[in-house]
Image (spheres, rainbow, N blue to C red):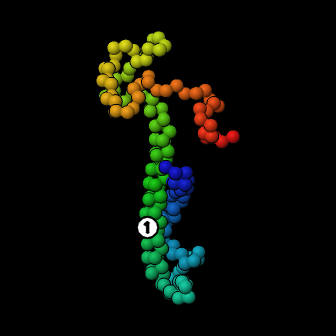
């Protein structure tokens, strides 16, 4: 999970209660709000959007406010869900590191050898047949001797001086 996703998840978890409160308030309030002002019977709410104006009566504005409240409520629940999911993923990421050192099911834990140089302990693991060698390749132990570092066998060989 990226750092940006973690940041957005935590911000969503912080903002969700405020949006939830706003949604509940807008859906349950008897007051009708128009641009921050309380409307009374007979008032007309005029809103402007891109040069167009919309006039609403008190009942139309109450319906608009309730619709907006339900939208806020739904968005708050979604944000809270995303925030909780993010926190759970962060928690799982921290717990995963110690669990990596536990033996996995189906793989019995092997004891460590008691003496140095005897790993794996003799007779504990099945022996594997040697790999067949292809023609033209040296067998193990038949590699040519390498010159000491800094000495080259042919003049002009890389690296140039």
**Residue 101 in the image, given as x and y percentages of width and height:** 45, 29
Q: Is residue 54 above or below residue 75?
A: below
Question: Residue 120 is drawn in which quadrant?
Answer: top left
Residue farthest along the front direction in this orientation: 155
**Depth order, front residue of 43/93:** 93
Residue under the image location 33 percent in, 14 percent down: 123
Residue at the spot 63% in from the left edge and 40% down from the top edge = 156
| Rendered position, 142 above or below 53 | above
Look at the image and tell me whether residue 61 can be seen: yes
Of residues 101 and 154, the one drawn nearer to the viewer in this rendering? 154
SS at mark 1? helix
Instruction: Determine whether, in the image, residue 102 is placed left or right of residue 129.
Output: right
Furthest toward the bottom, the residue is: 52
- How many labels sit on residues? 1
Judge by depth and name the residue closer to the eye, 67 or 136.
136
Mark 1 nearby-residue class (10 Å; few <14, some 14–19, many ≥20): some
Q: In the displayed structure, would residue 51 be above or below residue 95?
A: below
- Which residue is pictured at 52% across the width and 25% down the height? 145
Q: Position of residue 80 (x, y in %)?
A: 47, 55
On the image, the x and y values in percent for residue 104 come to 37, 30
Q: Report the residue at 51% width, 75% height from top.
A: 32
Circle 1 residue: 70
Using the rendered image of the protein, determine whether residue 13 is visible from the camera's viewpoint.
no
Horizontally, residue 138 falls left or right of residue 4, namely left
Q: Nearer the viewer, residue 102 or 19?
A: 102
Name the image quarter holding residue 14: bottom right
In the picture, the quarter occupied by the C terminus is top right
Q: Is residue 139 left or right of residue 17?
A: left
Q: Residue furthest right?
A: 161
């Amino acid at each position: 999970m990226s750092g940006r996703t973690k940041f957005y998840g935590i911000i969503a978890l912080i903002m969700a209660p405020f949006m939830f409160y706003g949604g509940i308030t807008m859906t349950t309030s008897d007051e009708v709000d128009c641009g921050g002002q309380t409307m009374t019977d007979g008032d007309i709410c005029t809103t402007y959007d891109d040069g167009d104006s919309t006039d609403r009566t008190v009942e139309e504005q109450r319906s608009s406010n309730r619709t907006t409240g339900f939208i806020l409520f739904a968005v708050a629940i979604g944000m809270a869900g995303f925030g909780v999911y993010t926190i759970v993923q962060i928690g799982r990421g921290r717990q995963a590191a110690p669990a990596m050192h536990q033996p996995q099911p189906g793989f019995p834990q092997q004891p460590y050898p008691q003496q140095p140089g005897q790993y794996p302990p003799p007779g504990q693991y099945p022996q594997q047949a040697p790999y067949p060698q292809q023609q033209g390749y040296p067998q193990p132990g038949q590699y040519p001797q390498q010159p000491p570092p800094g000495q080259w066998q042919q003049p002009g060989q890389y690296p140039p001086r």
